[in-house]
Image: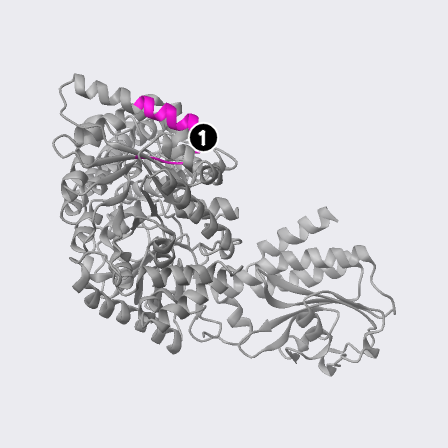
Amino acid sequence: MLETLRRIVQEVNAAPDLSAALEVMVSRVRKSMGTEVCSIYLLDHGANRYYLMATEGLNKSAVGNATLHFSEGLVGQVGMREEPINLDDAPSHPKFRYLQETGEEPFHSFLGVPIIHHRKLLGVLVVQQRESRKFDQQEEAFLVTISAQLAAVVAHAEATGAIDGIFGNKGTLTAKFDGVAGCTGVAIGRAHVVYPPANFKSVPDRAAKNIKKELRALNEALKSVRTEIRALGEKALLTLPPEEQALFQVYERMLDDAALAGEIRARIEAGNWAQGALREVVLKHVAAFESMEDSYLRARASDVRDLGLRILAYLQQSKPQNTTVPPNTIIVGDDITPTIFVDIPRDRILGIVSQHGSSNSHMSIVARSLGIPTVVGVGDVPLSRLEGLELIVDGHRGEVIVSPSGEVLRQYRAIIDEEKQLSKELEVVADLPCITTDGHRITLYVNTGLMADVGISIQRGAEGVGLYRTEIPFMVRDRFPSELEQMEIYRQQLEAFHPASVTMRTLDIGGDKALPYFPIHEDNPFLGWRGIRVTLDHPEIFLVQIRAMLWASESLDNLRIMLPMVSSITEIEEAMHLIHRAYLEVLEEGAHVVMPQVGVMIEVPAAVYQCREFVQQCDFVSVGSNDLTQYILAVDRNNRRVANLYHAFHPAVLRALQTVVTEVKAEGKPVSICGELAGDPRGAILLMAMGYDTLSMSASSLLRVKWVLRKIGLARAKEILQQVWTMDNAQVIRSHMDLMMERAGLGSFIRPMHFPGPAKEPTT
């Protein structure tokens, strides 16, 4: 059975389109099961009807014409019950509906199984026979297994809009594509598809007739690309902060003899012509990066490919031409890199959509720095059909909607308008303290990682930095930054917020964050070598970073140090020993600094239950609510199959958060929280009621949270929290918080966080 399944799946996946795939499926299943009929009925959700879309054994003329209402016939029953129906005499069943055009009258045996993908009913797979008999359990199991494979094919066709064509809807493509949020925000504009100037697939192997001539051609191409990259780097100086500008230095170094250039020359000297040698080297590196499990390292493949294509364009004497980009543009491409959109005037780009990439790719980092709503990893999006079409880029949910309906468009425009209006209203509280109506004072910090975050954070009244992600300067380089380089970057942050405190998290790599020059390969990286575990194993890295932080704080004394991913007392003790060692070293070298406060992050369940012991070893505690939620619920929120199970309002998560604040306060130490829950006004109300002293969030959430907390009393927040403790369901808690805010006249502060449903489904 497994071998048969494998062959069928391979043939279906190799089919050129959905119609061909369905034909292959019914033909192979009929033959494999030895039945007389195999048919596939697909559900048109718009018409709420099933259509016969492929058959082997019934009249072919009925394909596309035979139809049943959603609840009609045995096919309808299979769909509504969402389970197989196995009958030895189908015509005698009360729900049997005879379709004359199919010619199914002679067939008595019936086995139908639903085609379901991620809880969504897509159709029904049916086999029939003249003989009156029930199909046995093995046959039923085989058909259920085949149906599960078919579901993925149909779901892909639905996502790309291909299914519209077979239903007869051959008009403008309307579809929703899922990806990963590269930069938050919403943009509505027209698609402008960018293609690489050259293509490696068309480059053959060819013996070099004149090796010296080929080497000269390569040198000229490399020289031209270096000039091009330097010019782009100079443009980046005007738009990007220093740490993002370093990306273009990385690109230049990749062209050095010690990197790509040297390998290409070696291939030419071995006898291949320049274009073939270039293709060999670049595709080898691309394949190596793409095969890596770590998302950041996979993202480096796009950098290598981009440089390789630029060199190839010069070798082919087809220098990339700058195409004029119209206003209100959404840049769309197979693998967008910073070198593509940095060259385009910022005011013309509303959003970015890339088939490849990740939230940690260089492109995403630069997009966040420029504030461009971005969705990456949208592998299904059909580039050839998008030029000029209207797109919605939903950088909050990582979705792209193509040719949205009028209603969806209206909702998203309302969201953008409401956000703009709300931003104007919120500006009045920027310089005011966060004090509740009954006089309770709560501190609001920001999370930062880029210098671009600083200006907007200060403008919006941030009282300090609750989380500075130090890994960003490490991620945009091709080597560990030196102590001096780190010190200069940290100094900028500390000076910008002085005298307010800046909490710097020590290097937090691993999980979904890795360094190209320090690869970590693990089967389960989120439960592996990450955070404090890495830096304690490499004290040489940890000590350099701590020294850089300490030197940066000289004469400012507003540094706080925070340790990530701590799960045991031993880790705190070892880290504190190294921190004190670094402190004594810089004092001996003449630094005038005070010993900074040191705290730990509560991100894993073990830390929740030992937080009292933890805080006895340090100065403060900060909860990382995103990771804590992920670990408590055992849900990878980047995994689309289970992301819907990730709920920060889950009762277990809220109880853990209350445990932490109660235990830490019992020791008389301050406790803060950084994460998305703190930046959600609903979550902020509950966290304040629990007793958190400080909430740290993205700068974009700061004013909204401040406005809401200034409009509600601590006593009222505690009443709401008591109501929440009686609830056992995350959705109920969230809905209750929405209702409480509506009643308090604060509904507008949560509506912008609600987004319309998929373009093909009714929105509520």
Residue at 80% x, 63% y is 35
Residue at 63% x, 59% y is 150
Residue 36 located left or right of residue 489: right
593 w.r.t. 114: above or below? above
Residue at 16% x, 18% y is 589
Q: Residue furthest top?
A: 588
Hey, which quadrant is residue 249 in on the image? top left
Residue 687 located left or right of residue 52: left
**What is the magenta range?**
562-578
* Rendered image coloring scheme: one colour
Hey, which quadrant is residue 541 in on the image? top left
Q: Residue furthest bottom?
A: 100
Q: Position of residue 110 (x, y in %)?
A: 79, 69
Q: Position of residue 562 (x, y in %)?
A: 31, 35
Per the image, is 565 magenta?
yes
Residue at 71% x, 58% y is 144
Per the image, is 691 magenta?
no
Residue tagged 1: 568
Q: Is residue 627 visible?
A: yes
Residue 750 located left or right of residue 439: right
In-front residue for pair 712/564:
712
In-front residue for pair 326/361:
361
In the rendered image, which quarter contains the C terminus? bottom left
10 Å crowding of disc 1: few (<14), some (14-19), many (20+): some
The three-letter amino acid code for the residue at tag 1 is: Ser
